[in-house]
Image (tube, helix red, strand yellow):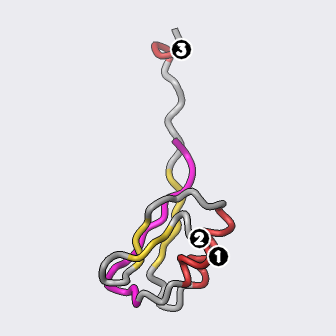
Amino acid sequence: MGGWSVAVDQDKCLGTGICVVYAPDTFAHDEEAKAVVVGPTDPLDAVRSAVEGCPTRALRLTPRPLDPPFTDEERR
């Protein structure tokens, strides 16, 4: 399942809303106005802009490992 994973460090988040502006289908605010991941359904460029624009560096974007190749038994 390759792709990307995005996470929020709740301790660093100040709820500025930059992430929601850049990637509204990926981020939202919880009841404490802290960012939470609800997607990620925005284009990767939008999510990357949100991560880079976060003033407290509370967001992290990391690649997910690709699925392992099929074994010989699975190919049959």
Of the residues tagged 2 and 3, which is closer to the observer? 2
Q: Are marks 2 and 3 in contact (CB under 8 Å)?
A: no
Classify 10 Å Cα crowding around label 2: few (below 14), some (14-19), many (20 and above): many
| Element on which disc 3 rests | helix
Give the residue pinned by disc 1: 49
Label 3 to label 1: alpha-carbon separation:
40 Å
Between residues 71 and 52, which one lies in front from this camera angle?
A: 52
Q: Is residue 48 above or below residue 40?
A: below
Give the class, few, some or many, for how many residues have Cα within 10 Å of label 1's Cα (few <14, many ≥20).
some
Q: Residue 8: within the magenta?
A: yes
Query: Residue at horizontal 69%, vertical 67%?
Result: 45
Observer-nearest of 45 and 60: 45
Q: Does residue 35 appear left or right of residue 24 in this picture?
A: left
| Three-letter residue code for mark 1 | Ser
Q: Residue 2's x, y, as percent? A: 55, 46
In the rendered structure, which disc, 1 or 2, sits on the residue that comes first in sequence? 2
Magenta span covers which residues? 1-14
| Residue 22: quadrant of the picture | bottom right
